[in-house]
Image: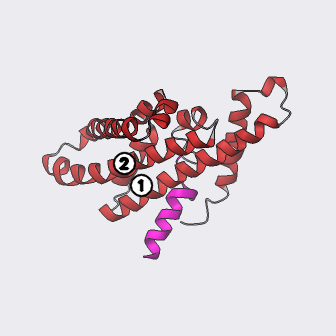
Amino acid sequence: MSEMIQLFIKSAIVDNVVFIQYLAICPFIGMTAETGKATGMSLATTFVIILATAVTWPIYNFVMVPLGLEFLQTLFFILVIASLVQLVEFYLKKSAPGLYSSMGVYLALITTNCAVLGVTLNCIGKNYSYGQSLVYAFGAAMGFLLSMVIMSGVRSRMKIAKIPASFKGIPILYIAAGLLSLAFLGFKGLIK
């Protein structure tokens, strides 16, 4: 059990998908202006990451490997992820129309969110079991949520800060993201 807890902490904090692996930068910059939107985007992405891992792991291990189709894993995984995003989009359109409209194009971009594909490929590349893959996916998704919420908090503070004109907008966002990445790099030796 402690192995699963370590895997969760490692995937959420030590190997954070945004701050350490530099995946999902588009929604990280585009959806963190407000905490509500950042949280909504993160929860939708969390659902897709976990579901995509739950679906792609058995497809890879029980269908693709026996048939010798491992070279098509990226194509298959993208098709699975795109289908799952469509399901999330339909669900949000019916159950949370405000969140659906506020997310705009970023909801459809979950399909091309490299964090979703990266997590599924990492599970295969690291030879995780099905249970380990689900824990890794949940941890990575929580790490994504954590990074989005932290950045939305930083951005809310930047709204009232005196920022030099040459750094306003995107430049200060990348500087803040770099500093946050350095902070998360401090966790690197926490779990081997």
Q: Rounded to the nearest whole Å, what is the CA distance between mark 1 and mark 2?
A: 8 Å
In this view, the residue in front, 161 or 92, is 92
Q: Residue at x 47, y 65 (%)?
A: 7
Q: Is residue 10 visible?
A: yes
In the displayed structure image, the side of residue 92 where residue 63 appears, left or right: left
- Quadrant (top left, top right, bottom left, bottom right) of the N terminus: bottom left
> Image check: 178 left or right of 43?
right
User: Which one is nearer the viewer's eye here, 30 or 121?
Assistant: 30
Is residue 184 part of the magenta span, yes or no?
no
Q: Residue at x 41, y 55 (%)?
A: 137
Residue at the extreme top of the image, as rendered: 166
Could you tell me which secondary element the residue under label 2 belongs to? Answer: helix
User: Residue 125's x, y, as percent?
Assistant: 36, 52
Can you say whether 127 is above or below 99 in the image?
below
**x and y percent of residue 26 in the render?**
54, 33
Snapshot quadrant of residue 28 = top right
User: In the image, what residue type sits under mark 2?
Assistant: Thr
Residue 137 bears which disc, if any? Answer: 1
The residue stretch that appears in magenta: 1-17
Disc 1 residue crowd, few under 14, some 14–19, many 20+, Cα 10 Å = many
Q: Is residue 17 left or right of residue 92?
A: right
Q: Main secondary structure of the magenta part?
A: helix
Q: Is residue 3 magenta?
A: yes
Disc 2 crowd, CA 10 A, few/some/many (<14, 14-19, 20+): many
Labels 1 & 2 near each other (Cβ < 8 A): yes
User: With 17 as the anchor, is 78 left or right in this view?
Assistant: left
Image coordinates for residue 80, horizontal then vertical, percent: 28, 40
Q: Report the amino acid beneath label 1.
A: Ala
Could one spot residue 19 in this view of the protein?
no
Residue that label 2 marks? 120
- What is the x, y in percent for residue 93? 39, 35
Mark 1 or mark 2, earlier in chain? 2
